[in-house]
Image: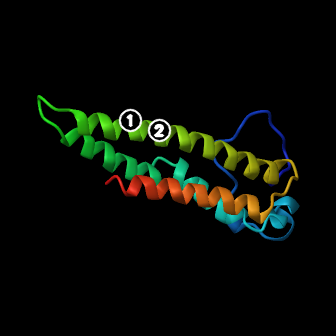
Amino acid sequence: MLLGLKDDYSHDGRALVEDLTGWAQPPAVKKSGSFVSLAQMYKQIDACVGQLGLATLAVSTKALESGSSSDDSTYTNLENQLTSISTQRDALAAQMIALLENAEFNGQPFSNQQARQLISQGQALLNSVNTMT
């Protein structure tokens, strides 16, 4: 991003713009006032050791510990919920990274309203997993 180089693939992550100032920060990132907040939520739901990853690990462990030789209903229920959460996370993360990358590399700012909506959905996803533990 700092060199202005373009590539033709999706990135797995985002630029750490918190440490960049002045000319080093792309204009669209500056205009997107909620860039950092959105990027931080993206990390929490997408990183393996983010809040969502750690919470789903706890739920999966709980699922494995549940049940007996005659009843796996708790395990099945929790794992099905985790599958749904993963699908929701994938869709939400795709929307987030699209906004972040477009601001970083394509000069397309996004509105605070767009960011707030996605951040809210991310927080709701985290809350739903946290209630499962």
Pointer 1 with pointer 2, Cβ within 8 A: yes
Identity of the amino acid at label 2?
Ser
Q: Where is mark 2, residue-wise?
A: 84
Where residue 66 appears, x then y in whole percent?
19, 41
Instruction: Judge from the rendering whether residue 115 lies leftward or rightward of residue 50; answer left or right.
Output: right
Decide if residue 16 is in sight here: no
Q: Residue furthest left?
A: 69
Which of the image's four quarters has the C terminus? bottom left
Note whether 96 is above or below 35 in the view shown.
Answer: above
Decide if residue 28 is in sight here: yes
Q: 10 Å neighbourhood of mark 2: few (<14), some, or many (≥20)?
A: few
Element under disc 1: helix
Q: Where is mark 1, residue-wise?
A: 80
Q: Residue at x 67, y 59 (%)?
A: 117
Where residue 54 appears, x then y in whole percent?
39, 52
Q: Choose between 19 and 101: the one closer to the eye.
A: 101
Color scheme of the displayed model: rainbow
Where residue 101 appears, x then y in whole percent?
76, 48
State how far apart marks 1 and 2 are (Cα): 6 Å
Element under disc 2: helix
Instruction: Judge from the rendering whether residue 31 lies leftward or rightward of residue 40; answer left or right.
Output: right
Identity of the amino acid at label 1?
Asn
Q: Choose between 40 and 73: the one closer to the eye.
A: 73
Note whether 27 is above or below 42 in the view shown.
Answer: below
Q: Residue at x 38, y 35 (%)?
A: 80
